[in-house]
Image: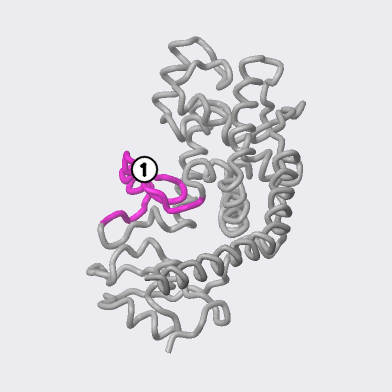
Amino acid sequence: MKTLKNILAAVGLIALSGLFIFAAQKSPSDNTIQEEQKKLINDYNVYALAVPDHLEFAGEAVPLEDPDVLERMDRELLVNTYWQSNGLLMFKRAEKYFPVIEPILEKHGVPDDFKYLAVIESGLTNAVSPAGARGVWQIMKATGRENGLEVNDNVDERYNLEKATEVACKYLLDSKERLGSWTLAAAAYNAGNAGVSRRLKEQGVTDYYDLLLGEETGRYLFRIVALKEILSNPKKYGFNFKENDLYKNIPTYKVSVDTVVTDFSRFAKQFGINYKILKIHNPWLREDHLNNASRKQYFIEIPKEGYYPTTP
């Protein structure tokens, strides 16, 4: 028993010595960490934003002299400036997808500012809404089909960014013709032409900024303008990044297909890529095969060599 007590005492002394040594070694770094944390807390501030004196959308000025308009604009600038992680993602994705969208808008005579509508619709992802809208431009099934898109379980061209942008342009041009302004055309993209027309008539006004709208459509244009302002002036709103931080649009070439494709995995390997990469560049191909009973001509995008590891 006495021997056991001696052993336990020795173990206790060793453990205690270790604690003292550990504490002595740990202390300086602990102090450094605490100092850094204190500095971070002291340096961290959240600032109110100054709403710019002049903002516009598609060449139409935002009437910031109206206090209601000013408050609503301030809200969207604050929300989107201080949602930093989402903001950085928008900068990264814009670098990748705007080069596809911009020339199509220009071709149709749709103001370049409408690329920011795609940002708020989907975050530049192939999103699916609870109502069934899909793709970067959030196009409903009926709207897609009415405008010539193929929409079924095998092929859904709402996920084809080029074709979906063409459809969005047609819709926006039609809305501008019906409603008279680009701001109202933007609102109609969210609420529909009939819905916006009805509210204009009921309220006896002709301008988006004079309309009383529901929460979503009421915020819609302000969100677009806020994203335009922030994405156009990153440093002004505290976003710092290097060019190589942004996502790149990988160059592709198109392969014409007018037959059935029974297995896209094997099809992809013919071009030195795998099924995953094929689907990344062709999200409109919804299954692992192409039915194509009508022998329709499709164009499948294949990334150029050197951007992905070669598939054996």
Residue furthest out toward the left: 293
Q: Is residue 42 left or right of residue 130?
A: right
Q: Which residue is mark 1?
A: 129
**Residue drawn at 25 percent across, 77 percent down:** 262
Q: Is residue 17 above or below residue 311?
A: above
- Where does residue 11 sit, x and y in percent of width and height? 50, 70
Q: Is residue 3 left or right of residue 44?
A: left
Q: Is residue 224 above or below residue 115?
A: above
Q: Is residue 128 left or right of residue 59?
A: left
Which is more toward the observer, 144 or 240? 240
**Residue drawn at 55 percent across, 26 percent down:** 180
Amino acid at circle 1:
Ser
- Where does residue 103 sit, x and y in percent of width and height? 61, 55
Dividing the image into 4 quarters, which one contains the C terminus? bottom left
Element assignment for label 1: loop
- Where does residue 167 sit, x and y in percent of width and height? 45, 47
What is the magenta segment's predominant secondary structure?
Answer: loop
* Total numbered labels: 1
Instruction: Give the quarter of the image for residue 259.
Output: bottom left
Instruction: Give the quarter of the image for residue 68.
Output: top right
Q: Residue 129: within the magenta?
A: yes
Q: Residue 117: within the magenta?
A: no
Which is more toward the observer, 75 or 136? 75
> Which region shows up in magenta?
124-152
**Residue drawn at 51 percent across, 65 percent down:** 12
The answer to whether residue 169 is visible is yes
- Tell me how the rendering is colored: one colour
**Residue drawn at 43 percent across, 58 percent down:** 160
